[in-house]
Amino acid sequence: MTRPLIAALLLGVALAPASPARAAEGVRELSHACALAGCLPNDAPGYPITIDVPGSYVLTSDLTPPAATDGIVLAASDVSLDFRGHWLRGPYTCGFVGCSPGTGRGIARASAAAGLRSAVRDGGISGFGDDGVELGSSSRVEGMTLHRLGGDGIVLLGALSFAAENTVNSIGGTALVLAGSALYRENTIAVLGPSVSGGRPSGPNSCNDGRCGASGRKLFYLSPATANGAGADAQCASGFHVAALSELDRPGSLEYDTDRGHTLADSGEGPPALPGWVSRPGLDCSGWSSSASNVGGGFATPGYGEIPYVGILCTGVTRLIGWDPSGATCNNVQRTWCVQD
């Protein structure tokens, strides 16, 4: 083989274009250009981009799907999606009085078996009539900005999931919709609807409705409405349950939810000194299903007090909060003490 021919072959190899969905070894690229042609072997041309192979993916440009169309659909689990500062932008806009529900999701799952153990990070999603991003159990959403959505912001439907350092505003639904055991921290939320449904704060958050656990402690509250024993658990919002007395007896680990809970003029930031249903061994109105006068349920009232103490170097008083437990028949009507899952 002549030297000119060898040189020509080497030059052709050097200039040959890489696969449109392949970046570094083991990482696939996603862009608006490849979306129009099909980014992956089983991805049809046009939006949505369908990811059906586990692995790592990065955005190399903004993605701009048309109206009423999903942006990315996960048909596999164990997917890591790094936006690298890019945006997934649909054309949906909010009205003057808010964001009405529509169609088209930012990142969706093809089925309940997809989007598990997955991660989305470091970018933005806006302009969709439905939810921003939905993932399953053991998944993470971190460092994302979501706005101009007709549905919910971040939806993590399975256990052991995590949402951190996200910003959510100008959406029609709930900012964070989380399974009971999901954790969230350092999120900034400003929405017209609820900031958080479910989950548990593992660190401070900032939200305009006060529901997101700014201190990182679990929230608890006394329900504003009353019910007999058969309806006690229905007084607790999604992501909350009827408190066990043992849960309430650890005030340092709890933060009173003044937004959801009943308050009195003199109760300040703490719980009001009023009785409410609680779960106690053998006293739960048959699993909160009975309103009978011959079945028992537990209830408790918080108590405040100050006791003097004398130390070697100082004297003073200690402010205490304790709980006065009692019981009642299940035909009684009471408020309910609720604590975050």
Image (cartoon, helix red, strand yellow):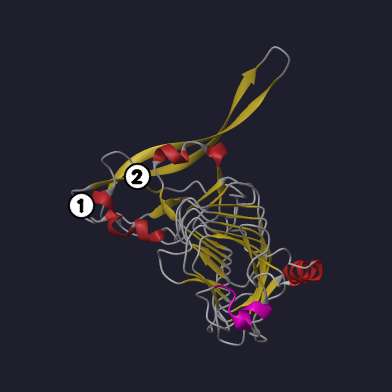
Q: Position of residue 173 (x, y in %)?
A: 55, 73
User: Could you say where residue 189 lies in the image, as x and y percent from the top left?
Assistant: 66, 63
Above or below, comparing residue 297 to residue 211 in the picture: above
Predominant SS along the magenta part: helix
Is 217 positioned to the left or the right of 167 in the image? left
Q: CA distance from mark 2 to mark 1?
A: 17 Å
Residue 255 coordinates in the image, percent (x, y) = 57, 46
Q: Are marks 2 and 1 in contact (CB under 8 Å)?
A: no
Relative to residue 113, is residue 67 depicted above or below? below
Range of residues picked out in magenta: 32-40
Question: Is residue 170 a member of the stretch shown in magenta?
Answer: no
Give the labeled residue for mark 1. Answer: 293
Residue linked to disc 2: 279
Lower position in the chain sequence, tag 2 or tag 1: 2
Horizontal side, residue 197 vs residue 164: left or right: left
Q: Amino acid at mark 1?
A: Ser
